[in-house]
Image: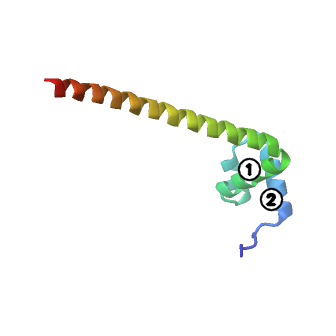
Amino acid sequence: MARPSKYPESFRRDAVELVLTSDRPIRQIAEQLGVAHETLRSWVRDARRAKDPEQVAQAEQALETAAMRKRLAELEKENEILRKAAAYFAREMDR
């Protein structure tokens, strides 16, 4: 069972609204409110997800695609190294 939040829902909503309407960093706002910056960051993230789940899904998909492309590049590089090693050892065996 999850522990109940020590911050009232109205405080959370006001803090998120302050972050979304301000040009100040989350860390600075969190410090002024007396909240851990990661806590405030998670409130903002949750509020954005609740506001527009489709946009969040698209952003998550873009991150996943970028990670997959990076992994593909790594695998292609590893494959090239293995191909070169196989060719080298094949030449050594022919001697």
Mark 1 and 2 residues: CB-CB less than 8 Å, in contact? no
Q: Is residue 61 above or below residue 16?
A: above
Residue placed most toward the observer, 71 or 53: 71
Q: What is the x, y in percent for residue 31?
A: 68, 55
- In front: 10, or 62? 62
Query: How many residues crowd mark 2 within 10 Å: few (<14), some (14–19), many (20+)?
Result: some
Q: Amino acid at mark 1?
A: Arg
Colour option used:
rainbow
Residue at image coords 63%, 40%:
64
The answer to whether residue 63 is left or right of residue 17 is left
Q: Which residue lies most toward the bottom here?
A: 1
Disc number at residue 45? 1
Q: Secondary structure at mark 1?
A: helix
> Residue 83 in the image: x percent, y percent?
34, 28
Closest to the observer, 6 or 71: 71
Q: Nearer the viewer, mark 1 or mark 2?
A: 1
Residue at the front extreme?
Answer: 94
Name the residue that disc number 2 marks. 12
Q: Which residue is depicted at the point 45% across and 30% down?
A: 76
Residue neighbourhood size for the residue with mark 1, other residues' Cα within 10 Å, grouped as few (<14), some (14–19), many (≥20) = some
Dot 2: what SS? Answer: helix
> Residue at image x 49%, y 30%?
73
Quadrant in which the C terminus is drawn: top left
Q: Quadrant of the N terminus?
A: bottom right
Residue type at mark 2?
A: Arg
Could you say which disc has been placed on residue 61 in the image? Answer: none
Please, is residue 87 above or below residue 25 in the view? Answer: above
Query: In which quarter of the view is residue 62 placed?
Result: top right
- Sequence-wise, the earlier of marks 1 and 2 is 2
Q: Position of residue 18 (x, y in %)?
A: 81, 48
- Separation of residues labelled 1 and 2 (CA atoms): 12 Å
